[in-house]
Image (cartoon, grey):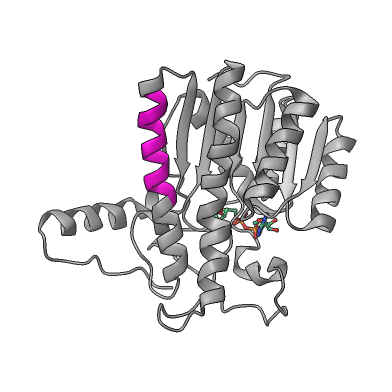
Amino acid sequence: MQIVAGQVAVITGAASGIGLAMAEHLAARKLRIVAADIDAVGLEQAADRLRSTGAEVLSLRVDVSSRSDIEHLAAQTYERFGAANILCNNAGVVKRGKVWEQTDNDWEWVIGVDLWSVIHGVRSFIPRMLAGGQPGHIVNTASTAGLAAFPMIGSYNVAKSGVVALSETLHHELRMEGAPIGVSVLCPGLVATRIGDSERNRPGHERTAQQAPISMRAPGAVAMQAADVADYVARAIESDQFWMLTHPAYDDFVQRRAAGILNRRDVVEPLPI
Ligand SMILES: NC(=O)c1ccc[n+]([C@@H]2O[C@H](COP(=O)([O-])OP(=O)(O)OC[C@H]3O[C@@H](n4cnc5c(N)ncnc54)[C@H](O)[C@@H]3O)[C@@H](O)[C@H]2O)c1
């Protein structure tokens, strides 16, 4: 899909990090932006900044884990702009802790924000996009953690693996339908954002001390800037690239994981976390 001025981009998690950078990139290219986030204050600041550059922005406070919030987001998008061309299901959180030590509430929070959000997003938007008949592209944000598991973030690994599987399925089904809608799964390595402080926007939860930083650092990898991820995503949309693997430094890790599966024996040595 070519990215063209006047198209509509819907971005969740748009108040910070990668989502904000994607909103800034697409607004600079004169797309109309629907910015959604649970952080009402951060979202308004981001939306005001975008508007000050001349962008047309609809901002909505949304909890992406809520089916009704996402349905409302889709309805509002179509009421205001009559289309959605790019949908970035991007909001995400991470919780540090061993698999057996994370509570029910930890698991539900992470799976809700990282996986149910994408399920809700595609279920609410794709029927409207198909009915509209315009070219479209869905970008689901997973992670390198969706391609190989990292210790101490089990709920995140599970959710992001689910996002990868959902995206592959969606790609096949949209092809079968002959729909003009592409799909990509974004699997970054380390990006300089506020993801390590995910608890700051956790509903109904006393804000706890910032978690120990989660590094997921491949040998030789440096944290990428969110703006560079956004540039990469836009180029990859235009070249209809399914796998958006932004960090070549993790290729060896993914390759060793695949080799381990095929030798039916070895679990890949984890990267330090
Ligand atoms: N930063 C990294 O190193 C990295 C690596 C791989 C994947 N990712 C993924 O990138 C995506 C964006 O994260 P980021 O790194 O920009 O972090 P970030 O914390 O800077 O931004 C995440 C945004 O999601 C919002 N959010 C959290 N819970 C929400 C909810 N229930 N409803 C709506 N919005 C909610 C937050 O308010 C925040 O604005 C996430 O899916 C994350 O898992 C990040």
| Relative height, residue 77 to residue 186 (above, below) | above
Q: Does the magenta-highlighted stretch encompass residue 150?
A: no
Q: In which quarter of the image is ligand 1?
A: bottom right
Q: Where is residue 263 in the image (x, y as percent from the top left)?
A: 10, 58
- Which residue sits at x=46%, y=36%? 184
Q: Is residue 244 visible?
A: no
Q: Position of residue 257 (x, y in %)?
A: 24, 58
Image quarter hosting the C terminus: bottom left
Q: Does the magenta-highlighted stretch encompass residue 168?
A: yes
Q: In this view, does 186 lie to the left or right of 228?
A: left
- Which residue sits at x=80%, y=28%? 80
In this view of the protein, which residue sits in the foreground, 252 or 178? 178
Q: Is residue 169 left or right of residue 41?
A: left
| Relative height, residue 184 to residue 111 (above, below) | above
Q: Can residue 126 be seen in this view?
A: yes
| Relative height, residue 226 to residue 129 (above, below) | below
Q: Where is residue 64 in the image (x, y as percent from the top left)?
A: 64, 52
Q: In this view, does 246 lie to the left or right of 45?
A: left
Badge count: 0
In this view of the protein, which residue sits in the foreground, 10 or 147? 10
In this view of the protein, which residue sits in the foreground, 59 or 266? 59
In this view of the protein, which residue sits in the foreground, 123 or 216? 123
| Relative height, residue 38 to residue 212 (above, below) | above
- Which residue sits at x=41%, y=63%? 157
Chain part drawn in magenta: 163-175
- Where on the picture, by quarter, is residue 100? bottom left
- Which residue sits at x=45%, y=59%? 159
- Overall secondary structure of the magenta stretch? helix
